[in-house]
Amino acid sequence: MKAVRLDAIGNLFVREVEKPVPGPNDLLVRVEACGVCGTDRHILHGEFPSKPPVTLGHEFCGIVEAVGDKVTTVKPGARITGDPNISCGLCPQCLNGRVNLCRNLKAIGIQIDGGFADYVIVPEKQAYEIPLDLHPHHGAFCEPLACCLHGVDMAEIRAGSSVVVLGGGVIGMLTVQLCRIAGATKVVLVTRQAEKRALAEEIGATHSFDPSSGDAIEGLVGANGLLPGGADVVIECAGVPETMEQAPKLAKAGGTVVILGVMAAGDKIEIEPFDILFRELRVLGSFVNPFTHRRAADLIASGAVKVEKLISRTVGIDEAPDVISNPPRKGEIRVMVLPNG
Ligand code: NAP
Ligand code: ZN
């Protein structure tokens, strides 16, 4: 079968590999769709730890073709979405319920062969069944949605909250929708591209803002801005220094900042500790998807979170390395790789 292999940092190719065989607790899944994520680009450039040689692709869904002897909860023919993040269940963090902080965390598509392939092996405990009548590409949004859901849970959004979401990629677009579902009445998506601002307003943002149109801080939270005095919650979903530095300045006193965007390890930004102290800001990091995958899958299966318009284009497996090696095209939100056509 074909697979998108990261041979070494910076080296990504489609290769012919053996079709995998499921172990006793595993499912063999024929991949229907696997999304290209910002994190795949970070992995390729060595900015996010991986373990080459490995097949990339951590946002996948597909049909179970075969199951191992010990599998009891999933049957061949079912459609599943995979939670790629595998915790050990034994380390102090796991025993404390912080599975995403597991010392031995491994991820399908990052350290273990993933979904940019005709088939992927998924341990039974990482598989979440989704309806067969769902659009075959939509299940591939469960993983990014589960990450956003963890961030939105951490933000403790309440009915009537105001939120600024920075960055109009897929993470920002999903976060905007979750904030509305969680009860926020004002949700402002900040992103530079006009197409993305228009899309955000179509799918749930109450307002959008162009950060290149002038002073973003003044325009958003100044006296005549959209949210004078600041937002209850700011969620950083761009992963660039500019938005990381803006995030605390956009929160109101006593507000919450959640960092979802990834900056490379070692990169630094300027913050003003006095401001965090004096205005009692809560600044929280949100890493992956602890116990949120089931809810994410249900939000997609029910249609409560809309994903169709987030698919900018679909490509075959041969085009995947090129897509991952290049920055997203103008206006592009999510490219979906369809290994089996
Ligand atoms: P993405 O497609 O690169 O989206 C980020 C968006 O930010 C871009 O589309 C860009 O849109 C916008 N942006 C860039 N500079 C900006 C600025 N100065 N002001 C406002 N917006 C700006 O990436 P993604 O897939 O949505 O992922 C977002 C981040 O989350 C990435 O860093 C990814 O690694 C990370 N992530 C984290 C988790 C987690 O568990 N925490 C999970 C998945 C992904 P415009 O060109 O329109 O500005
Ligand atoms: Zn991802």
Image (cartoon, rainbow, N blue to C red):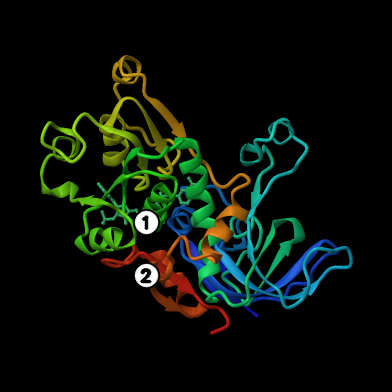
Q: Identity of the amino acid at label 2?
A: Lys
| Marker disc for residue 309 | 2
**Residue positioned most to the bottom:** 341
**In the depicted view, which residue is nearer to us: 165 or 266?**
165
Q: Quadrant of the N terminus?
A: bottom right
Q: How many marks?
A: 2
Residue occupying the point 38% across, 50% down: 180
On the picture, is 156 further left or further right than 201? right
**In the depicted view, which residue is nearer to us: 142 or 243?**
142
Label 1 crowding class (10 Å Cα cut-off): few <14, some 14-19, many 20+? many
Q: Identity of the amino acid at label 1?
A: Met
On the image, the x and y values in percent for residue 67 come to 80, 71
On the image, the x and y values in percent for residue 308 come to 42, 71
Mark nearer the N terminus (1 vs 2):
1
Residue occupying the point 62% across, 61% down: 53
Residue occupying the point 56% across, 63% down: 56
Q: Secondary structure at mark 2?
A: helix
Label 2 crowding class (10 Å Cα cut-off): few <14, some 14-19, many 20+? few
On the image, the x and y values in percent for residue 94 come to 71, 36
On the picture, is 288 further left or further right than 23? left
Please say if 333 is above or below 18: above
Please say if 21 is above or below 199: below
| Marker disc for residue 128 | none
Please say if 96 is above or below 175: above
Q: Which residue is mark 1?
A: 173
